[in-house]
Image (cartoon, helix red, strand yellow):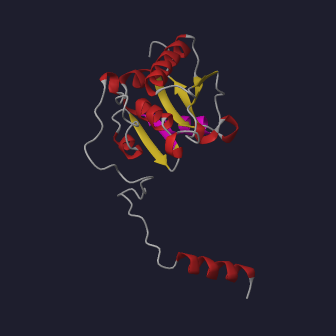
Amino acid sequence: MTKRGDDTDAFAEAMRGVKPLASDERGRVPTRPAPKGPPPRRAPGGAPPADAGGGPIEELSESATFEVTAVGETIEARGTGVDIKLLRRLKAGEPRAEARLDLHGRSREEALRALERFLELARGDGKRCVLVIHGRGAHSRDDAPVLKPLVWHWLATAPAAAAAVLAFVSARPAEGGDGATRLLLRRPGR
């Protein structure tokens, strides 16, 4: 038997008894089960409260401002009416990031305040693309990301984000991969 046949047989054996995950009408499989209980309360400005984790990633696909696709630990989102080609360019690393914000070690509240201020300043300086470093959560309690879902949720739902951001995607590996998010900013006055 060939090596390919051995691999196929080994894979079939390993998958015996495995049940496929349920997908939605678009064929997407949720990244984690939806939490039980009531949805998190919202604070003014669309941000989740300090005790919330940023809301389930699945909620982001319901954003009124962005078309969001979250797969595993990555995300891509574009504002309503933004050309898909712009999103592809952003994913490919164009334009290059002109400013960076590192949120490591900050509390949820500090991170959101810093992010909002950073976007305001970057946009005021005419920057088009910025990088927000939120980390992967490797050193967080339970080894789960805290700031990443918080940042993504804020970007997808906050009015201040909608006013400043055209699109956002997980960073390329050289920029931090899924531990950072690239943002394409609106031009000032638009």
Residue at image location 53% in from the left, 39% down from the top: 140
Residue at image location 36% in from the left, 23% down from the top: 159
Q: Position of residue 70 (x, y in %)?
A: 47, 46
Judged from this view, the residue extending furthest toward the bottom is 1
Judged from this view, the residue extending furthest toward the left is 38
Q: Position of residue 21 (x, y in %)?
A: 42, 64
Q: How many marks?
A: 0
Residue 23 image-quadrant placement: bottom left
Q: Quadrant of the N terminus?
A: bottom right
Relative height, residue 159 to residue 86 (above, below): above
The magenta segment is 75-91
Residue 53 image-quadrant placement: top left
Q: Nearer the viewer, residue 127 or 133?
A: 133
Q: Quadrant of the C terminus?
A: top left
Judged from this view, the residue extending furthest toward the right is 2
Residue at image location 57% in from the left, 11% down from the top: 125
Residue 81 shown in magenta: yes
Residue 46 shown in magenta: no
Q: Nearer the viewer, residue 179 or 140?
A: 140
Q: Nearer the viewer, residue 74 or 91?
A: 74
Q: Position of residue 151 (x, y in %)?
A: 47, 31
Left or right, 131 with reference to 45: right
Residue 91 image-quadrant placement: top right
Q: Position of residue 60 (x, y in %)?
A: 39, 40
Left or right, 173 with reference to 40: right
Relative height, residue 123 to residue 36 (above, below): above
